[in-house]
Amino acid sequence: AKAAGRNAYRFFETSMNTNVHNQLQIMQDLRLALERKEFRLHYQAKYDAANRRVIGAEALLRWQHPERGLIAPDHFIALAEKSGMIVPIGEWVLNEACRQMRTWYDAGRTEWKVSVNLSAVQFAHDNLVELVKATLERHRLPARCLILEVTESTAMQDVETSLSILNRLAGLGIDISIDDFGTGYSSLLYLKRMPARELKIDRGFIRDLADGTDDAAIVSAIIALGHSLDLHIVAEGVETEKQQDFLTELGCNSLQGFLLGRPMAPEQFQALTTMQVDP
Ligand code: C2E
Ligand code: CA
Ligand code: CA
Ligand code: CA
């Protein structure tokens, strides 16, 4: 029933593109979803490649639709961006992720970081820095507990404005992460100017990773480049032991993927990480 629900939604979405009425409908749906508290955050563990310990989690948005079931972000983020609804939704995401990080912090996970995805539309809003600052203060969270993930295209929309916002965010003590690295059109000059702490290699390069392949050469070059720029390197989409071992050997700092854990509801995430014994 869940799969059928998703397909129904996808159909709805496609027809929506040519139908103004449906566009208004989905904007209304997104607004109602926020009011009715139908959004959820799932968390995917990020772990240290060297010792395989969890070091934090990425917050990933879900829509718990009353009829259509759990809807993945690819089905509604673009519409939320187009309608501007991503601004209040993104604000909710940031607050909820920080609230969750606070409970982990209180449970002793003081070294963890929570990663939040930012959309380009949120960058166009000039109060982003104030919003982030106020959210951290609300939850009495040190800035080092938050990572903001931006894609190359997020920051490419208006380079100078984005860089100025990112510099102010980094100035707060937050880590900036470049998501989906290798899929955009950014130049190395741009990478050099980004106040980033972390670089996430897109999972497209990880999928067919094996000794001697082009992907192996690319990944190894990205890791070398990133390290020379003093960046922390994360590989996403790690699904096999083989990929895990290979990436660790190449010097990748952290890993994320279905091998260690899928994105999951907070309660399940709790169960996954309590198996981890503290030193
Ligand atoms: P992303 O930021 O690149 O997130 C990683 C996506 O890869 C997630 O999909 C995750 O479930 C999936 N993934 C993780 N490990 C594996 C693996 O080992 N194999 C495979 N095949 N997939 C894996 P998800 O949760 O469906 O999110 C899709 C995209 O939606 C995200 O891509 C991100 O761009 C966007 N998104 C999610 N949450 C938010 C949000 O709160 N705000 C904004 N603006 N965008 C979001
Ligand atoms: Ca991400
Ligand atoms: Ca990514
Ligand atoms: Ca992506």
Image (tube, rainbow, N blue to C red):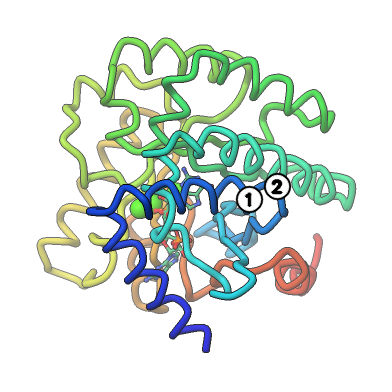
Residue found at the far front of this picture: 21
Q: Which mark is residue 134?
A: none
Q: Is residue 220 visible?
A: yes
Residue at mark 1: C-beta within 8 A of ligand 1: no
Left or right: residue 66 versus residue 201 is: right
Are the residues tagged 2 and 1 within 8 Å (C-beta)? yes
Residue lying farthest bottom?
1
Mark 2, ligand 1, within 8 Å: the answer is no
Question: Label 1's element?
Answer: helix
Q: Is residue 227 above or below residue 254?
A: above
Residue 133 quadrant? top right
In the image: residue 132, left or right of residue 152: right
Return the residue at label 1: 32
Label 2 residue SS:
helix
Q: Toward the viewer: 248 or 21?
A: 21
**Which residue is farthest right?**
106
What amino acid is at disc 1? Leu
Which residue lies at the image location 46% right of the left edge and 53% below the top edge? 26
Residue drawn at x 23%, y 69% as measured from the top left: 209
Residue 195 placement: quadrant: top left
Residue, x 52% and y 83% (percent of image)? 2
Q: Which residue is mark 2?
A: 35
Q: Position of residue 161 (x, y in %)?
A: 36, 11
How many C-alpha atoms fall within 10 Å of the one at disc 2: few (<14), some, or many (≥20)?
few
